Image (cartoon, rainbow, N blue to C red):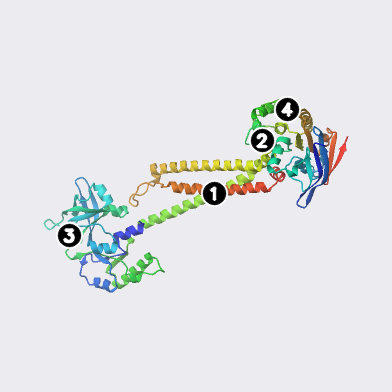
Amino acid sequence: MSFIHVDNVSKNFGQVQALRNVEMQLELGGQYAIQGASGSGKSTLLYLLGGLDRPDKGSILVEGKNLDTFNDAELARFRNLWVGFVFQFHFLLPSMNCLNNALLPAKIGGADLSEVEERVRLLAQKLGVEHCLKKSPFELSGGEQQRVNIIRALSLRPKLLLCDEPTGHLDSENSEKVVKLLKGLASEFGSTLVVVTHDQMVVSHFAQRYVMKDGQASYFPL
Amino acid sequence: MTLKKSLRLASGDITLFSEDGYFSEQADFLNDLEELQINQRTLVLQTEGFVITENVSRGVLIQGVSPDSYAGVTGFKEELLPGGISIGVELAETLGVKKGDPIRVALANGNRGFKGLPRLETYTVSSIFELGLYEKDLRGVYILKSELQQSLNLEGKVNQVLMNIPASERNDQTSYSEEIENFASRLRSYLGPAFSIRPYWSDFSYLFEAVKTEKFWIGMILQIVVVISIFNVLAFIIFVNEKRSREIFLLKALGLGQERLKQVWYMFIFLFWFLSCLISVVMVWCFNFMLGHLSFFELPGDVYHLGRLEMIIGREDYLLVFLSALVWLLFLSWLGLRRVRQQSVLYGLRREFS
């Protein structure tokens, strides 16, 4: 049984059919790229995987459990404990410093803060942004903000790391660094990594790829 | 007691003066009043004078009245005994006298032996009244008409008729003030230019002007309060919808459930409300302090009883305002939460961060 099984999933937004009968199998610890043009449905698929929305048709099974059967509280808990999101736009809250931003999932889930803070500091050291933790997000460069974003996503050691265009607003040098970081950290934590991108350079780092076109996914392993 | 009621208590509906000054209590025009069915009327002898104690003297308006008929017209029912004088509460305080104390009154004329010198009479304070009008309570004194006539050598003469309009003039279509005005106008035509006829408020028109101005400014201030409140409500709606909804969707993406969100949200709202209440109480206290201490807020003493304004806000008033504000806040936050609930996290994130 695969870690995640996307079974014949469709999703509509009004008249627009974003996903059409998508089939997908993701293994625990696997690293995947989902490639596609803008509007192809790749981000929608990613967010459905992360329990941010529910499919109109079909099901998403995580370790055999259908996400559609989860109530709101269970789905929120799933997002908190199982999923780490890395968004294209960092989505860091300007009203708190970077350390507190990184600790948000732990605070929401009621995790042991001292343990998580220790992990956050280690990650920050590893990613070279330890000096940024006491700063506000707006004091940081784009690359630094994205690193804090990654730290927040990994702070609770999620089983599923979902990245939506993580290099979307970075230059090629920084993009490559971020992709390598993501892959390395996901391996270290044993997380399944799914990266949505339209950037060929990013895709080239992944052996397992899905290509999205008109709401449908095709698997292209190397 | 309202301002108009207080004024009426001092003079009845209409006051009639003769242009010739004093007139006989048996004058012919009094029969005309009878014909006009003015049954509630009283004759008054009014003059100016001074009340004197050992240390203080005050200019006063002395009214010589017949207690029964005067009470019938005005409703003024203070005890007035022979040799007695009824004075206002402010005057009593100024002079430092109480019921039963003697006071001397200097009348402007009437000294039989030495022309040009005032006549001094001693009266006993038989009652202390309070009409609620500072000027009346400070300057009005009442003695028996017959005693004043005797002191002024004006036996059988008076200079005012106070009257109430006949019951037949009353109707439900017009206000009481209008009825009085209409009747006074008819009386002027009937009696001719030899008499001056004034509605009870004419002597205090400046007071009404002051109250009118005051009402205008209170209205303006209330309107400003309402406009500011509307801006606050709009700001709060924008704050909830535009600023906080972004954070809410992000927190939901990171695993915050709807129930937990509701708890956090309402806790935030209660905190917001509590702090607002606290600040408003402090502001009221500060404003009250300024009213009591800054000369800018001083009131003209010749118009108002008090030289200083003071905000009188009771516990019930605070409760009413604070509870209304809480209900309003809860309603607005419920609308905000409903909006968040109706949108999926995915839709919200895309909309808020696009």
Disc 3: host chain: B
Q: Position of residue B110 (x, y in %)?
A: 16, 58
Between circles 2 and 3, the one closer to the viewer is 2
Q: Position of residue A137 (x, y in %)?
A: 66, 34
Q: Amino acid at mark 3?
A: Glu
Q: Which residue is mark 1?
A: B327
Disc 4: host chain: A
Say what secondary structure mark 1 lies in. helix
* Label 2, label 3: how far apart the Cα atoms are: 94 Å
B288, A142: nearer the viewer? B288
Q: Residue at x 85, y 35 (%)?
A: A208
- A146 left or right of B99? right
Q: Residue furthest left?
A: B113
* Label 2, label 4: how far apart the Cα atoms are: 24 Å
Q: Position of residue B11 (x, y in %)?
A: 29, 61
* Label 1, label 4: how far apart the Cα atoms are: 49 Å
Q: Residues within 10 Å of mark 2 (few under 14, many from 20)?
A: some
Marks 1/3 same chain: yes
* Label 1, label 3: how far apart the Cα atoms are: 66 Å
Between circles 1 and 3, the one closer to the viewer is 1
Q: Which mark is residue B31?
A: none
Q: Which residue is mark 4?
A: A127
Question: Looking at the image, is mark 2 or mark 4 earlier in the sequence?
Answer: 2
Marks 2/4 same chain: yes
* Label 4, label 3: how far apart the Cα atoms are: 107 Å
Q: Which residue is mark 2?
A: A109
